[in-house]
Image (cartoon, helix red, strand yellow):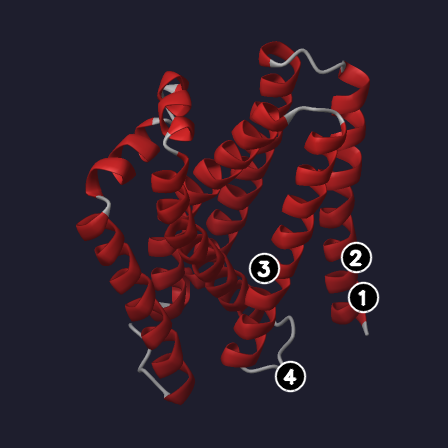
Amino acid sequence: MIDRIDAQNEYVFLVFLFILLLIGLVRQWERERLTLFLKSFINSNLIDTQLRQERAFSRLAIFNFIIVVLVLSTFLSLMFHQFHFFEDLSFTGLTSGLVMGLILLTTARVALYAFLSWLFNMESLQQHHTFHWLLTNSIQAIFLLPISILLAFGPTEIKDATAIIGLAALGIFYLFRVLRLSMLSAFDFHVPVTYNFLYICALEILPVVAIITMISRQFEG
């Protein structure tokens, strides 16, 4: 049986409506670039062409980033509440906090990558890194959006399984992104394995461990 839409679910519905509106606008305004962008997930030879069109890609990237942040924040909020995390926070409060946290985290990482690329004269690697990061997360958002809608408005009996599927997808996409970026650095730009290992530990694994630890402590206490 499908849950009735209460006051909180009305906010969830409005968030989904806004996300779908953004997707529709991107398809309307940037259909060709969006198609080329998504095809790059399979055919990496298309990436250089898009990076050369920096201004055109930047416009698409802004919309894609907003969609990624909204979808991921919405899914995490629904998942946390499904498993009784952060129950003292409303959906709007939790989602707003996650949106701000993801924006701040991403901004800090982009600033750090930009500084390191300037310091070691590796601007091309930084551009490819940013592109692959956004591409993988955009594909992930496409996958998580219907899962989030089902988690919000689907039958109660399958919500736990839906949340687990979403978490598994989140983990798979995360590992895929880390491996893809590591291979890009090692084979295309000949970055030493040691640097790749330090990157994975410091900028990929450590933030995730910190977040998991924080959530675990909140659940226990």
Q: Amino acid at mark 3?
A: Ile
Q: Is residue 52 visible?
A: yes
* Alpha carbon distance from label 4 to label 1: 15 Å
* Alpha carbon distance from label 3 to label 1: 23 Å
Residue under label 1, please give it: 217
At 61% from the left and 18% from the top, the residue drawn is 183
- Residues tagged 1 and 2 counted as in contact (Cβ below 8 A): yes
- Residues tagged 4 and 1 counted as in contact (Cβ below 8 A): no
Q: Is residue 154 visible?
A: no
- Neighbour tally class for label 1: few under 14, some 14-19, many 20 plus, Cα within 10 Å: few
Q: Of callouts 3 and 4, which one flags the residue occurring earlier in the amino acid sequence?
A: 4
* Alpha carbon distance from label 3 to label 2: 20 Å
Screen quadrant of the N terminus: bottom left
x, y percent for residue 147: 38, 55
Q: Amino acid at mark 1?
A: Arg
Q: Quadrant of residue 215?
A: bottom right
At 74% from the left and 23% from the top, the residue drawn is 196
In the displayed structure, does residue 197 sit left or right of residue 65? right
Residue under label 2, please give it: 213
Q: Amino acid at mark 2?
A: Thr
x, y percent for residue 137: 48, 43
